[in-house]
Image (cartoon, coloured by chain):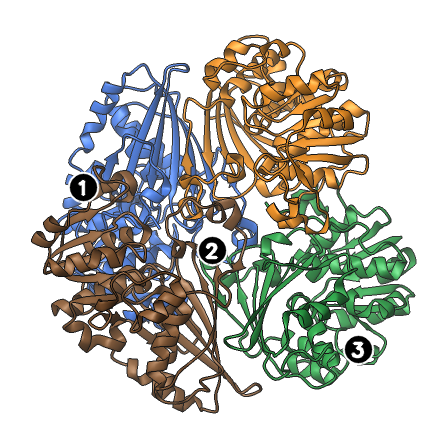
Chain colours: A brown, B green, C blue, D orange
Amino acid sequence: MNISVIGATGYSGAELMRILSGHPNTKVVHAVSKSFAGKKMSEIYPSFLGCDYPLEPLDIPAICADSDIVFTCLPHGTSSEVVPQLLDGGVKVIDLSGDFRYNDAAVYEKWYNTKHGAAHLLNQSVYGLTELYRDKIKHAGLVGNSGCYTTSSILALAPLLRSGLIDTGSIIIDAKSGVTGAGRSEKLPLIFCEVDENFKAYGVASHRHTSEIEQELSIAAGSEITLSFTPHLLPIKRGILTTIYASTTASKAQIDKAYDIYSNEPFVHITNTLPEIKHVIGSNNCAIGFKLDERTGRIIIISCIDNLIKGAGGQAVQNMNTMCGYSESEGLNNIGWYL
Amino acid sequence: MNISVIGATGYSGAELMRILSGHPNTKVVHAVSKSFAGKKMSEIYPSFLGCDYPLEPLDIPAICADSDIVFTCLPHGTSSEVVPQLLDGGVKVIDLSGDFRYNDAAVYEKWYNTKHGAAHLLNQSVYGLTELYRDKIKHAGLVGNSGCYTTSSILALAPLLRSGLIDTGSIIIDAKSGVTGAGRSEKLPLIFCEVDENFKAYGVASHRHTSEIEQELSIAAGSEITLSFTPHLLPIKRGILTTIYASTTASKAQIDKAYDIYSNEPFVHITNTLPEIKHVIGSNNCAIGFKLDERTGRIIIISCIDNLIKGAGGQAVQNMNTMCGYSESEGLNNIGWYL
Amino acid sequence: MNISVIGATGYSGAELMRILSGHPNTKVVHAVSKSFAGKKMSEIYPSFLGCDYPLEPLDIPAICADSDIVFTCLPHGTSSEVVPQLLDGGVKVIDLSGDFRYNDAAVYEKWYNTKHGAAHLLNQSVYGLTELYRDKIKHAGLVGNSGCYTTSSILALAPLLRSGLIDTGSIIIDAKSGVTGAGRSEKLPLIFCEVDENFKAYGVASHRHTSEIEQELSIAAGSEITLSFTPHLLPIKRGILTTIYASTTASKAQIDKAYDIYSNEPFVHITNTLPEIKHVIGSNNCAIGFKLDERTGRIIIISCIDNLIKGAGGQAVQNMNTMCGYSESEGLNNIGWYL
Amino acid sequence: MNISVIGATGYSGAELMRILSGHPNTKVVHAVSKSFAGKKMSEIYPSFLGCDYPLEPLDIPAICADSDIVFTCLPHGTSSEVVPQLLDGGVKVIDLSGDFRYNDAAVYEKWYNTKHGAAHLLNQSVYGLTELYRDKIKHAGLVGNSGCYTTSSILALAPLLRSGLIDTGSIIIDAKSGVTGAGRSEKLPLIFCEVDENFKAYGVASHRHTSEIEQELSIAAGSEITLSFTPHLLPIKRGILTTIYASTTASKAQIDKAYDIYSNEPFVHITNTLPEIKHVIGSNNCAIGFKLDERTGRIIIISCIDNLIKGAGGQAVQNMNTMCGYSESEGLNNIGWYL
């Protein structure tokens, strides 16, 4: 399978390149970087010194001629400019921005505060969370790869909402992410001495991922859901841990049964003890544990992923595997790094 | 003022020793360490190399003879053995364990899962959060210094509950602490390679501080409060950030007015932008910010302290200053380290 | 190839298990853990939740019956008790301790301050640094896998000493390692709050790896070498950066030529810019850069490896590949994680 | 004493402001920030929320009219533009840049690769390392505050060179610094995900501090010294640990005797065990330990400081205390934070 990656030198793009390099069925034929075209990948990420790629400027006709699947790792807004041209060129696209995750352009435009550049494609794009949309992804030409916070939240809550086990008005998602989630960008709040030994909330009551989570959980519940979502910045590189609160009268057995939907999933694990970020880092896993609190009538769910893998590049490759008929875990690590 | 510190070589004790060394009105006459008696403080904490103390075994008569105030930095259960003897010896005591924070021994015994060793003292001990109990602390002989998670939670919520502004059944406290909160202890989950680049929840729906927070917030509300409290372990040394959710119909003006109670407090700051852990580290400050979310009808409050200072040694010195008639901020830093 | 790992739950053992799990030609038939026999690997390292192993007590006859190659990840001293029995049982052994790295038991006994338990095997064991002893390793029955600090030091210096380009009396090795190098052990100096935001030297003028480096560099130079080696502890999990100083009158061209010996090596990379730890983490690479300082007549060499991979488990698998006739990089990552 | 700080919002400036705020004899009358004039200090560093300052544009006449002493925390090159005007205005100046540390403008111009803007002042500026130039500093009108790497290096080596105990041609300084040393600047190599879990050398054989160290050590030795200096970047905020190698035939007693020069110094401590960065962080201390290695005929010295305190703002206040006749440790912490 010939692959191109547009936006190969952001953190998500670079991680995707790393994963693809170890995939037995893919060959990266074009690695595109606007900022670093003409250089080699190893000049930007010296970790590629043993397995290098030339970085090219964006040449859509060449990409379309040579590629079966194209991954777009671009800022939102830019994706919706580039993706239509790629589709017109006859390739399949997996887009890692927020541009093609929405069913309703109005929701996107409200939360992203910008006009959608390719709203006509939203009815054909598939939401790229394999566990929820596997059958549609198999036949998709355009996948809007699910976001990082959203993946950890939706996988944890969708089964309970589908089974009607929690109070739909009571959901609070308190999420914590490593700094790679902010991308490779030279901003003061991201420099080491501002982040190290610090912790903060951001985007309180206004983060875009709120709308993406609400969209998917509303579908799961079959009714409109409004919820609280609070992201925080952890002084670590990778990983998301999401703490979720919801009112429930369900028993442990009922919750377990709802989660049985994941029993054959290669990457979603319901754990007896509560998962930690280091349990999943380096893998495409999502680990989910929960505790029922009788005192308060709430369930507390902990969900962990590696934001760069299950929350970006790994999820994208899982979608690609699904689209191509490969084993879903081809080229993806089941065992995390731990250290 | 002659001071003794019992338990000078745990993290809380050592931090208290550091603060006391810079206090213009105090002299540490006995620094007691069970584990390291006979050594010098600088052998255990080389940061004391410019200002050292001999470490002594526990000699209660000597301590009582020489001291005006004694700080006990002992494990819960041990404090209730030692403190009665100190009181009998005629000294005032500020205890940093959980033993003397409760009004009802039964609550303590349920959450700490142990018999209280000095329940008869609970009716004379004062809860050691200066901002709430200043007048009682002035005349107290025994202060149960408030806990770390609890301080950040109670200071944020008490004014709103006193003013009846939030739904008392809706409170969720999602708290994140640095590792010093776990003390200086050689446990596998605390070694560097297990904590670094990791993040986890612990004590979910069962942490002891839940009961301490519920006690004080019930008093503030004038009605019994049951709430969710979830502590998490941050891969940093110091600091607590607490994210609090509650349903409310109050306006920003009403919330602001409730918080006016702190307008003359030297250490509690209501901030316009949301506080971060690094804003308070190294200081005795508690910084509180909030956001009203009309979509969900909730207030989200962020409260930050340095767990070793406002959550332990600094709070203890603030209480001591109050008991001794010193300026409340004597010997305490108003400016955090930031770096 | 059937593999057993003895000592599967230390950090080196667990990393080796992780690497072997991704190796296309190996099957781990026995994972032995003294401390955790009867449990599953995922109970000790939840990162194995997608690919688990039962942990067994040590049963040498069963291991010898079932295995082609056995990796021993045991403390020094313990290895020399177990390895002879394995060899007697007819299996090949790759030992990750210091026990079988020495040509002269007296040197081992002086630096490790203990009697060698199997000195008679030293003349048949091969020093396990593939780049230096590839031909011997191919036919070896017992490999003493090279150490972490030593690998980074020897790979950097051996070519220059073979070519006679540096003053043999002038070598100073200032090395810095991540904390995994100290193993998974519950010691006070290893707990998070003692390591985080700290940095220290240790084992100054007395670290055991000095003798291992001196042995191999003396062989490379053809004369006895005595050198200064100072290890330091970095507040990171993985990685070693070694800064090496030596007096030289060689030109850049001469140095480059000496390093040409690595031009076909899959894992040793001479870089134009100086390497950093994050360039190699997660890979089996050793990256080496240097600068000639005319002012002082010295060469400064920077050498980086991942101590758990090229300095332990990855090196061990590279040796195994060599012994088994597989491609040397089978199952080993050429691209580091960077993030 | 009325103080002004020019460049109050860089890391060195902010730390100096923090220290001055706790000094009993000083009042900051002008806090100057080019970038943030018109804002309050707490808007830039919210740690100042309990003790704020207005930030002003540079107004040299006003500063000269109101101030006794001015601290300039400006980039090199900028200092030499501003300082002459301040001196003309009749105030004393302590400059924290490299501009006034040199005796010979040619050396400065070679290593800083720029023309010196006020070379005529070099013969009246005093090198601002109190321990070496106390008497001159007492009467100085212009002090070139010593640099961070240089302070840790010079304090460790000067006594041995004055006593002629080490081979002057053999000195190698391998130094490691926290990231605050690079200042508050939005550069890609300084963002969290590039620094965290990483370690690297930089400025190898070319760092400016080499020349400053050589200048002062040549004076101490009474002969021209050329040495190797290699700085490295630690993934921590504060602190410098310097590992120094030199050939020597001196005995431990001789070394101890040379270091006796520091026996009455409040901030320099010769320690029996080797110091670590966390032993000095938060204090104005320099801790120095050493080991003689008979095998190699070398002394290995470990020297630690807090780069923002003894290596910048604390040193500056120590110099100010000396100039003003205050106790040298007034307003300066002897006890580090440790945690």
Q: Report the side of D182 relative to D251 (left or right).
A: left
Q: Give the quarter of the image for residue C213.
A: top left
Determine the chain carrying the residue at label 2: B
Q: Are marks 3 and 2 on the same chain?
A: yes
Look at mark 2 in the image and give the residue it sits on: B196
Labels 1, 3: front one = 1
Along the line of sight, which residue is nearer the eye, C270 or C130? C270
The amino acid marked with disc number 2 is Asp
| Distance (Cα) linking label 1 and label 2 | 35 Å
Residue at the spot 77% in from the left edge and 25% down from the top edge: D65
Q: Report the side of D278 relative to A191 (left or right).
A: right
- Where does the image place residue D194, in percent across and percent down from the top left? 40, 45
- Where does the image place residue C285, in percent across and percent down from the top left? 27, 43
Tell me the quadrant of the picture where the N terminus of chain A can be found. Answer: bottom left
Determine the chain carrying the residue at label 3: B
Look at mark 1 in the image and give the residue it sits on: A54
Disc on res. B118 = 3
The amino acid marked with disc number 1 is Pro
Residue at the spot 64% in from the left edge and 79% down from the top edge: B166
